[in-house]
Amino acid sequence: MIALCPSTQLVEGGSGLRFDVSVDGEACGAFAVRYRGQAVGYLNRCAHVAMELDWVAGQFFDSEGKTLLCATHGAAYDPADGGCVGGPCAGRGGLRRLEIVESGGVVYWRPDPGVRPLPRPDG
């Protein structure tokens, strides 16, 4: 597991934590947010058009803190499971969920075979 941040950094419906991952050998953004008391994470890639969701770094929620919103085209996603709930992503699935766990006051990301840490520059 890879430590991302202290649990207290993720506030319900507030700013998210951005981090970088490798998907099929290419760098991609990812993020973690808190929703209904749980830390959840997704690739930062809209299902409508493969671009990052946040217009301002770390701002993923709508103004009410209820849905994750693509700032470019308005695609809306359920923070609980990443499924599309409105906008132009309809019929295009949803966000790719990442395994995020909390333990001992720390938020961790558990990589999987499809989404790995970025290679270190020193090898």
Image (tube, helix red, strand yellow):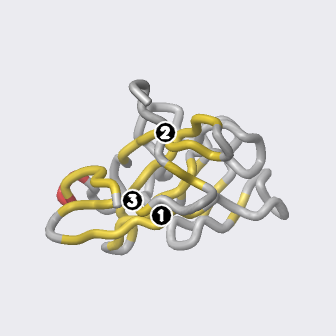
Q: Which residue is at 77% across, 48% downward? A: 48
Percent x, y of residue 15: 35, 47
Residue assigned mark 1: 66
In-image side of 87 versus 13 (left or right): right
Mark 2 closeness class: few <14, some 14–19, many ≥20 residues within 10 Å: some
Q: Which residue is at 47% across, 63% downward? A: 66
Q: CA distance from mark 3 to mark 1?
A: 23 Å
Q: Secondary structure at mark 3?
A: strand
Position of the C terminus, as image quadrant, is top left
Q: CA distance from mark 2 to mark 3?
A: 13 Å
Mark 1 and mark 2 lie on one chain; the one further toward the N terminus is 1
In-image side of 57 versus 46 (left or right): left
In-image side of 14 versus 57 (left or right): left
Question: Which of the two discs, 2 and 3, sits closer to the camera?
Answer: 2
Mark 3 and mark 1 lie on one chain; the one further toward the N terminus is 1
Residue assigned mark 2: 118
Mark 3 closeness class: few <14, some 14–19, many ≥20 residues within 10 Å: many
Q: Are marks 2 and 3 in contact (CB under 8 Å)?
A: no
Question: Which of the two discs, 3 and 1, sits closer to the camera?
Answer: 3
Q: Secondary structure at mark 1?
A: loop
Residue type, label 1: Lys
Res 89 label: none
Mark 1 closeness class: few <14, some 14–19, many ≥20 residues within 10 Å: some
Q: Quadrant of residue 18?
A: top left
When the figure is inspected, residue 119 is found, relative to residue 30, above or below; the finding is above
Q: Nearer the viewer, residue 47 or 117?
A: 117
Q: CA distance from mark 1 to mark 2?
A: 30 Å
Q: Are marks 3 and 1 in contact (CB under 8 Å)?
A: no
In-image side of 40 versus 44 (left or right): left
Percent x, y of residue 56: 45, 31
